Amino acid sequence: MTAKTHQKELERLKSLQHRAFMGGGEKAIDSRHSKGKLTARERIDLLFDPGSFVELNDLAESQCMDFGMDKRKVPGDGVVIGYGTINGRIVFAYAQDATVLGGSVGTIHGQKICRIMDEALKVKAPLIGLNDSGGGRLHEGFFASKGVAGMFLRNTAGSGVIPQISCIMGPCAGVSVYSPALTDFIIMVDKQSQMVITGPKVIKDVTGETVTLEELGGAHVHSTITGQAHFVAKTDQDSIEMIRNLLSFLPSNHEEMPPTYACTDDPERKNETLTEIVPAEFRRGYDMRQVIAEITDKNEFLEILPKFAKNIITGLARFNGNTVGIVGNQPCVKAGCLDYNSSDKAARFIRFCDCFNIPLVNLVDVPGYFPGVKQEYAGIIRHGAKMLYAYAEATVPKITLALRKEYGGAVMAMCCAGMGVDLMLAWPIAQLVVIDTTAAINIIYRKEIQNADDPESFRKQKIEEYDYKYSNPFHAASNMLVDRIIEPSETRTQIIKGLEMLKNKKRPEPFRRHGNIPL
Amino acid sequence: MSEKMLSPLSGKIIKLNTESGASVKEGDEILLIESMKMETPIFAPCTGIVSSINVKEGDNLEDDDLIAIFE
């Protein structure tokens, strides 16, 4: 045996590292590039601040010798794990390498992902998963399942502790979809990623339905129909940029406050256009996103699930450089009504904000819950209750602004007085009422209208009386259900002042295991 | 390729701005639906020709009812 030298051992290390670096080999890498896709390592390089990424366990490899694995195994086992900085803050990540056995989850592959999740949880820093995997590795039998189950355990343990973001960058089927599903946000790369429980072939065999993988679980489906994909990226590069931008709004963990930025947009800026954007004629709709763009810091609104349940808007924005979560009704879609999907969308977002110390700003213009057999059968009671639960449970600062309609039970679902709102604002044109005036009068004066000499003029007179007394924010203000009626032009300023006032709001420690939200 | 336009909500058609054979641009207001005491405009999902229109003013629509087909 020849004596060891530094040089020889370094060369041996370099050779192993080179094999790990090359993953599935040059041909496989070229094939990815020709499809416009990046390799796992290229994705990692783009994600982290230049030169900051440190790879761990790059030489871990499959211990399996069966079914040809002894010849096919590669150091790294098809997944890159490690840590680095994003905008200067520590972040952990794993990136599956589809050039190695299709990115399949073998025993070591799964252990590596679990290991980096443990690390992220130990130091309480965000976890990013770049998913590109065919699923469990069949060569290794049942062993890999422990790794997959271990991911579920850790995703759940990390829920509400650290932000977890999943990027789906290739086909993702079977149990592989559930680790991302347990995380806070999913980004899908359009046309190159899909998420399904069972693929088209199994579906054809079992139910006889014919469908393509893209039609079944592509980015379009998950961003518009299922509400599973919070963001859709055009390319790999685009998706990485989205992750970096999303993280810029978030704290590293539940104990920290979100990062603040120097704001170049005047906090006292008047919102003169709001009276043009929002029609005083209640029959007419408008785009609430224009209101959000007008009042928040310029170009600082990141809409979440923009194409799913569009009748409610959820997103992260900044006021005077500070992150807030915005929940707003969207009057130009389904009249801004709440329904089962919009309730789900909002409830999950509210809870996310509450986990990570992000104040909530609620922009209300809601005519009620959308009526109909479909809604009732779909469980609007159960789904609507999630929103009530989420707002009632949230202890972050909560500011609600009534712009126009605050009607019926939907008012509570948008966080009004009595739901623990910290500051309830209203515009002068707002109406905070139980139901629409005409409907109210028809019920209250049913007999009197029938018996009146001129039922129509009697009805009209009572409507006018009721409107004057109740269909305004003044009556609510006189009962302390509204804290302050503000001019539309001072909306930005008043919200910023409110957030400033609530900055040191003391949040009680949790005193129970967890509540039992209606699911 | 044809594209179907389905009703995004239930309600009554109070205004119909197009007819069979007309050409439309993406984003044109095709009809106005009254629902929950509000007027909700429905816009063309694509640029093309209206190859068939399945509704008329005054009709009551349900969710996902076929409004028109564009070519």
Image: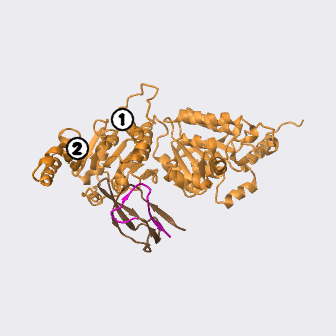
Chain colours: A orange, B brown
Q: Position of residue A153 (x, y in %)?
A: 58, 33
Q: Mark 2 lies on which chain?
A: A
Inspect the image, locate mark 2, and give the three-letter code of the amino acid beneath it: Arg
Contact between labelled residues 2 and 1, with CB atoms less than 8 Å apart:
no
Residue A287 drawn above or below residue A20: below
What is the distance, in whole Å, between disc 1 and disc 2 at their CAs? 21 Å
Residue A280 numbered mark, or none: none
Taking the image as shown, residue A305 lies to the left or right of residue A99, namely: left
Q: Where is residue A309 in the image (x, y as percent from the top left)?
A: 43, 50
Instruction: Identify the secondary structure beneath mark 2.
Output: strand
Instruction: Name the foreground residue: A411 vs A482.
Output: A411
Q: Give the range drawn in magenta.
A: B55-71
Residue displayed at 24% across by 45% down: A432
Residue A484 numbered mark, or none: 2
Location of residue A150 by image quarter = top right
To the question of a shared chain for discs 1 and 2, the answer is yes
Q: Which chain carries label 1?
A: A
Label 1, residues with CA under 10 Å away: few <14, some 14-19, many ≥20: some
Q: Mark 1 points at which residue?
A: A392
Residue displayed at 51% across by 36% down: A159
Instruction: Identify the secondary structure beneath mark 1.
Output: helix
Q: Position of residue B52 (x, y in %)?
A: 46, 69
Whether A239 is among the magenta residues is: no
Instruction: Name the foreground residue: A88 vs A437.
Output: A437
Q: Which of marks 1 and 2 is in front?
A: 1
Residue displayed at 21% across by 38% down: A480
